[in-house]
Image (spheres, grey):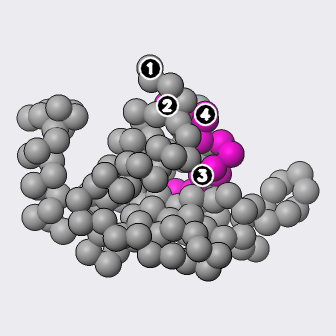
Amino acid sequence: MTRRARVEDVHETALAMPHVVVERAAGGRPVYQVGRKSFVFFRGPRPDAVDPDTGERLEDVIVLWVADEGDKQALLQDERLPFFTTPHFDGHPSVLVRESRLGEIDRDELVELVQEAWLSQASARRGREWLAAHRGSEGQPN
């Protein structure tokens, strides 16, 4: 196990992926894109994501794309992980996580999730090229 994840790991990993452009959403929040498709974004407060104790809108939500509904459900059902979703994201291939809870995730696991998010949005050619350069024959990082 590596150290616990931090928000800087999200930024560093997303920026390390090829062909990434950073757009800015409301409030200057970063939106990481590949081929004009978002794969990670830092979301502003919205009425669909509130603190269950206070009812306050969550200000520290990160959206990570996933490959498909199966991957989404696997992350959501893993009780050791802090991922969640809201009705707004029903049918959308993504999971949500609060910045304040990233420390509950192992850094290597978070890096893999950001890389998988990129792969889910990158073109097939870019994805194949990245995988060939960075992962062994069994899909594991080199």
Element carrying mark 1:
loop
Q: Residue at x 71, y 73 (%)?
A: 46
Position of residue 7 in the picture relative to residue 125 (left or right):
right
Residue 1 bears which disc, if any? Answer: 1
Marks 3 and 1 close (CB-CB < 8 Å): no
Tell me if mark 3 has few (under 14), some (14-19) or many (20+) residues whose alpha carbon lies within 10 angstroms of its own: some
**Mark 4 lies on residue:** 104
> Please, what is the three-letter code of the amino acid marked with disc 4?
Glu
Residue 36 seen by the camera: yes
Disc nearer the start of the sequence (3/4): 3
For the N terminus, give its image quadrant: top left
Residue 135: percent from left, percent from top: 16, 38
Q: CA distance from mark 3 to mark 1?
A: 20 Å
Q: Which span of residues is magenta-colored?
A: 91-106
* Mark 3 element type: strand
Give the amino acid type for the residue marked by disc 1 in the picture: Met
Q: Are marks 3 and 4 in contact (CB under 8 Å)?
A: no
